[in-house]
Image (cartoon, rainbow, N blue to C red):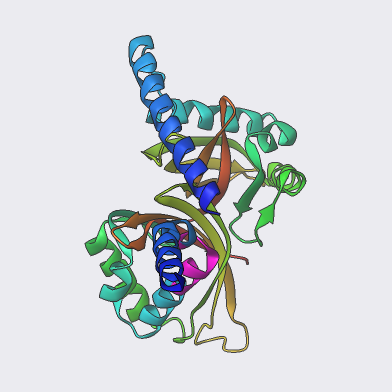
């Protein structure tokens, strides 16, 4: 355990050094910092585009393998298959989803927290407009950012 | 010799303590404190479990930012008198996101006064941050299963 925590400490130091270096590179390269609101908004847009196209597999691929989704009105689901099934089901009921990042907080070099809102239209006739608020945690997985936990609810 | 071993062992344990702090047991204690304060109607004590810049996204309510807004939100929940004072929160999963940050998910149950035979069951997701020696809630959101 001690060895592991020392190793973790060294990794952490290395990681933060890498992060500083990466930060410099990114500053030099332009405004592409992964934990910025703009970068997270791009991920939100990709999520919504996949959802609106009916691509449950593509939506599920944006989650870590051990992610949790806590849907309003149903028990939590865990893991890629269950998450794909959940979104496949949701796609039958709603569409035209648009999500907006309101507040993004860096949680260190490999995680970020996002709070935002989404609007959508139900697939009922006539369609109804809906809105929700959400909080998610993004985790860096290799070079890409993936959702580790995802939960939403309604204001009213 | 023995004393030295015990001393160094306890020193090492003390030094290693932050690694344990993200464990489910520690966060379960904090969740119990949240429920106990809420069940007593102590909004100030609930708000004290959050970081100064915390965001709370209550089910059927507006986003609250910061301790004063969180205290007002909890006060409103308590004063609505919708529920019995039997909130129970269970931490189910904890994930370390670094030395001072973790995310957690879990479930809760609480009994509506007008439907005592049907407790409301729901779930929450939070981000916790270590501030001094305490783990405080930095983001908190919940919803119902029905």
Residue B111 within the magenta-colored segment of the rendering: no
**Which residue is farthest left?**
B68
Left or right for A109, reference A127:
left
Left or right for A129, reference B65:
right
Residue A87 seen in this snapshot = yes
Magenta-drawn stretch, dominant element (helix, strand or loop): helix
Q: Nearer the viewer, residue A141 or A63?
A: A141
Residue B23 within the magenta-colored segment of the rendering: yes
Can you say which quadrant of the picture contains the N terminus of chain A? bottom right
Q: Nearer the viewer, residue B87 or A144?
A: A144
**Which residue is farthest front?**
B1
Task: State which region is magenta.
Answer: B21-29
Q: Is residue B43 above or below residue A9?
A: below
Where does residue B140 sit, x and y in percent of width and height? Answer: 43, 58
- Quadrant housing residue B17: bottom left
Residue pictured at 49% horizontal, 85% vertical? B86
User: How many callouts does the rendering have?
Assistant: 0
Q: Nearer the viewer, residue B16 or B119?
A: B16
Residue B123 seen in this snapshot = no
Q: Is residue A11 above or below residue B84?
A: above
Residue pictured at 40% horizontal, 74% vertical? B34
Where does residue A12 sit, x and y in percent of width and height? Answer: 44, 38
Can you say which quadrant of the picture contains the C terminus of chain A? bottom left
- Quadrant housing residue A96: top right
Where does residue A119 sit, x and y in percent of width and height? Answer: 50, 41
Where does residue B30 sit, x and y in percent of width and height? Answer: 42, 71
- Quadrant housing residue A140: top right
Q: Is residue A42 above or below residue B9?
A: above
Residue pictured at 77% horizontal, 45% vertical? A81
């Amino acid at each position: 355990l001690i060895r592991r925590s020392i190793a973790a400490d060294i990794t952490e130091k290395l990681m933060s050094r890498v992060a500083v270096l990466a930060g410099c590179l990114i500053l030099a390269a332009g405004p592409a910092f992964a934990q910025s609101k703009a970068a997270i908004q791009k991920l939100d847009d990709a999520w919504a585009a996949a959802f609106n196209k009916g691509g449950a597999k593509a939506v599920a691929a944006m989650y870590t393998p051990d992610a949790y989704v806590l849907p309003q009105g149903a028990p939590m689901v865990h893991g890629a298959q269950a998450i794909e099934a959940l979104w496949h089901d949701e796609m039958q009921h709603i569409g035209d989803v648009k999500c907006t990042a309101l507040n993004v907080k860096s949680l260190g070099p490999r995680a970020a927290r996002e709070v935002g809102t989404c609007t959508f239209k139900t697939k009922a006739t006539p369609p109804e407009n809906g809105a929700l608020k959400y909080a998610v945690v993004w985790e860096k997985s290799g070079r890409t950012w993936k959702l580790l936990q995802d939960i939403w609810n309604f204001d009213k | 010799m023995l004393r030295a071993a015990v001393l160094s062992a306890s020193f090492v344990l003390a030094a290693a303590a932050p690694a344990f702090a993200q464990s489910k047991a520690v966060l379960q204690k904090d969740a119990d404190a949240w429920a106990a304060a809420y069940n007593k109607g102590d909004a100030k004590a609930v708000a004290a479990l959050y970081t100064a810049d915390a965001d709370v996204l209550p089910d059927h309510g507006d986003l609250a930012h910061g301790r004063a807004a969180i205290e007002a939100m909890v006060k409103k929940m308590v004063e609505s008198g919708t529920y019995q004072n039997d909130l129970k929160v269970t931490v189910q999963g904890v994930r370390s996101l670094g030395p001072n940050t973790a995310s957690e998910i879990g479930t809760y149950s609480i009994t509506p006064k007008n439907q005592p035979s049907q407790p409301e069951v729901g779930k929450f997701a939070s981000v916790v941050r270590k501030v001094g020696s305490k783990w405080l809630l930095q983001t908190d959101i919940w919803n119902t299963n029905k």
